[in-house]
Amino acid sequence: MDAMGIIFTKMVFNQTTVQDLLKSNEEFDMVIVEQFLNEAFKGFCYHYKAHCVVVSTIGASRWTDFKMGNPINPSYIPDLILSYSNNMNFWERLVNSLTFLLATINFFLFTLPKHNEIVQKNFPGAPHINELYFNTSLTLLNSHVSINSAVPLVPNMIEIGGFHVDPPKKLPKDLQDYLDEAKDGVIYISMGANLNVKDMDEGQRNSILNVLSKLKQKVLLKWEVDNILAHPNVKLFITHGGLLSIIEAVYHGVPIVCVPVFGDQMMNTATTEVGGYGKGVHYETLTEESFGNAVNEVLNNPNYMENAKQRSKILHDQPMKPIDRAMYWIEYVLRHNGAPHLRTSALNLHWFQVLCLDVIVFIVIVVFIVIFAICKVINITCRKGPKKLKLQSKAKKKN
């Protein structure tokens, strides 16, 4: 994924429109950048001498946490490329920790230097990316404790999960009538922009259709209207497990069956299962039986609907709208000249210092030296002991 990000970032800078913008006399007070495998974009903040604000559409991750000096603990914070929830057993924590360590080493030793090359090419005279990478005034996270696991956040990392969801508008009459007349409820299916039903493997597609054909509920498949979930007759949402889709389902209190395909969708699915408002069926192993079991369990077990409604209450129980919170903090950064007082002192340390690797290595070396010295002393003492006893024995014999 890091290598893919390097390719995509280069493609952006190769766009004529981007180069024309950099050569223009445009001036900006703030640059807002989406955070996803595009570290060289921090060069825009340097170029315009503007405050840098980051928006992470997938919430907090190692990509956001390191640049903000935010604590990240692999014992209970799963890596987004894994299918784990925050409730991991020993082996999952082991895999998660190794993944985190190797990904971190790869990022700082390989990926970030590559992005530095892109920065130096497109922003002549720019400082090393290590300076730009950690110079972020604010990070806005598309997450909320109603959907995501609770994690520690430094003051300039603000959750705005649900900011994209608007109150429902009136539906077209034919669609409104279809939903109103569904006495047994409606099942809504949308696999996002990444997977069209027509592109599915025929066997998996038929498995899904066979299961749906046996249900008493009406079915809406891939209807590109967000307001569908707001209708009270919607009893189940079948989705690919994208974070935006899950947020929308939680916002409207609708239980979920996830069919994850790639990326963070596996982790999102695991989160819905731990939260008790969703069930997952992996796309690669989907069969009519496994999909049917998941759909019928969520439909027939009232706990899923109850948990979804409770999560919805948590998401709605906020002092201000997420979009208003985002705007407040954006303007706060402008009012306080980048708000440097919100930065944690962890940003003054190297990544290996943040992880205390230098301290651990030092302690290991000291312990090794002490043990080695004690062993040497004992060894020397033991050698001298027998010689002294032999001399004393000889002296007694002579006497």
Image (cartoon, rainbow, N blue to C red):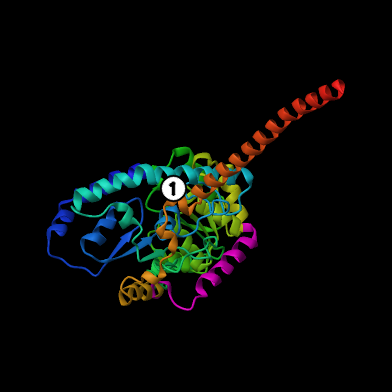
Of 242 and 127, the residue lying toward us: 127
Residue 371, above or below 310: above
Quarter where residue 325 is shown = bottom left
- Range of residues picked out in magenta: 300-324
Q: Position of residue 357 (x, y in %)?
A: 50, 48
Q: Position of residue 20 (x, y in %)?
A: 13, 56
Give the residue drawn at x 48%, y 78%. Answer: 319
Report which residue position mark 1 lands on: 263
Q: Position of residue 122 (x, y in %)?
A: 19, 51
386 to the left or right of 169 = right
Of 52 and 192, the residue lying toward us: 52
351 to the left or right of 136 = right
Residue 261, above or below 252: above
Residue 213, above or below 328: above
Q: Main secondary structure of the magenta part?
A: helix
Check disc 1 and report its element: helix, strand or loop.
loop
207 to the left or right of 35 = right
Quarter where residue 34 is shown = bottom left
Q: Position of residue 364 (x, y in %)?
A: 57, 43
Quarter where residue 158 is shown = bottom left
Determine if the magenta segment contains residue 303: yes
The C terminus: image quadrant:
top right
User: Which amino acid type is shown beneath numbered disc 1?
Assistant: Gly
Give the residue drawn at x 26%, y 61%. Answer: 45
Residue 328, above or below 31: below
Q: Is residue 240 visible?
A: no
